Image (cartoon, rainbow, N blue to C red):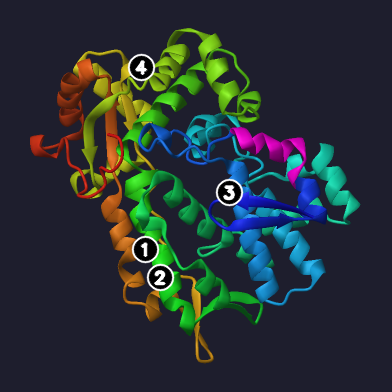
Amino acid sequence: MTEIRDPVHGYVKLEGLALELADTPQMQRLRWIKQLGLANLVYPGANHTRFEHSLGAYHMAALLTRHLGLEDEDRLPVCAAALLHDVGHGPLSHATEAALAPFLRTDHESVIELLKRGELREVLDGHGLRAQDIQAFINGSGLGQIVSGEIDVDRMDYLIRDAHYTGVAYGVIDRLRLLQKMTLHQGQLVVEAGGVQAATSLLISRLLMHPSVYYHHVCRISECMISSGIRRMIEDGASAAEVKGMDDVQLFTTLDNAGGYAAEMNSRIRSRKLFKRAVYIGLENLEPTLLRVSDKILAQEIAAEACVDVDYVLVDNPPLPDTIEGSFPALVGEVVRPLREVSPLVSILERAHRATWRFGVYAPPELQECVARGARRCLNLKKNTVQHTFSGIDNGYL
């Protein structure tokens, strides 16, 4: 057995299957991928990695599965899935997903091909585990609810860990109380009545962390810039599959070696010479039909209207917030009800998430004003909506 000192959970114990998995090259690669991508441009302390998070998710899965009284034959594969759930992530975590998605058939959640070859397969085979079963748990099937669901060990760890390293206090939750009050009811993972407040605090923490960290405007701008550079590099002949298999350092080196526009975006990010917000608005100021128009087409139209090079107009139209917030089951007496029906605070979270959503158009500082004017005309915006921000989200290093 090995004990690893973790700044969030104290000591994380690894033995047997978990220790063998953690020592594979595929897992060790996660040491060189930042958990929050480019968020250290806002919060300089946000340099923690996917490897740390994976250990944390495993640790919480181990605690929860023991609390639930699962036998080893059920507990071990669930814990393995928690440890491996991010093994397929591309460089800079979520920051590169949008750029790579059009060129790949699968996203980071589909890790089964990694599990079927190399050292990972040897370890799983040695313990009588099948790759497809681990993949099913990662996708949230059956006992995989513990790993992937609305309230799961993945989310518990990353909220606490991200809050710790950014210094943003919103991610603090009573994880031990929550773990103690979770149980299996007719095969379904539920939270008991005594854990409703802890579950509610987790969902509220996620709501507050989204605009403050995950969707902070500097994070969004830098992610759009790196995505634009990656797309150009792939269009010029680079392999999307090879890019996805890189770590952060390899990606920056490859972008720099690619030259041209890709190298320029890389240089701007590394020196923090970032684009600025020309437009930054909420749903209430955007025509619904524009949500269905591709970012590429909108960028072309805005660039033409502003008479600037389309490469220097970045449109950020992120997915709308999840509409199932608050559906996690709560066991009250002998009745299972959605959390939103048990907690009045949870019932308003969906609307609150939509209030934090932002549509952005970004451009270099010297082009910010002319792009804003062009975007205002193309998007039919009123002048006072061009720089509309959500109160309270501009934390960190702006």
Q: Which residue: 32% across, 18% down?
A: 312
- In which quadrant will I find the C terminus? top left
Question: Answer yes or no: do the residues labelled 3 and 1 have beta carbons within 8 Å?
Answer: no
Rounded to the nearest whole Å, what is the CA distance between mark 2 and mark 1?
6 Å
Element type at mark 3: helix
Question: Answer yes or no: do the residues labelled 2 and 1 have beta carbons within 8 Å?
Answer: yes
Disc 2 marks a residue whose amino acid type is: Thr
Residue hosting label 1: 204
Residue segment shown in magenta: 22-32
Where, by quadrant of the figure, is residue 302 drawn? top left
**Which mark's residue is nearer the viewer, 1 or 4?**
1
Indicate the position of residue 215 as horizontal and vertical percent values.
36, 43
Q: Which residue: 36% across, 31% down?
A: 295
**Which mark's residue is nearer the viewer, 3 or 4?**
3
Specify whether residue 27 is painted magenta.
yes
Residue hosting label 3: 53
Disc 4 marks a residue whose amino acid type is: Asp
Indicate the position of residue 36 as horizontal and vertical percent values.
47, 40
- Sequence-earlier tag: 3 or 1: 3
Q: Nearer the viewer, residue 333 or 139?
A: 333
Element type at mark 1: helix
Residue hosting label 4: 311
Element type at mark 2: helix
Q: Nearer the viewer, residue 130 or 152?
A: 152
Q: Is residue 313 above or below residue 279?
A: above
Q: Residues within 10 Å of mark 4 (few under 14, many from 20)?
A: some
Rounded to the nearest whole Å, what is the CA distance between mark 2 and mark 4?
43 Å
Q: Residues within 10 Å of mark 2 (few under 14, many from 20)?
A: many
Label number found at residue 255: none
Residue hosting label 2: 200
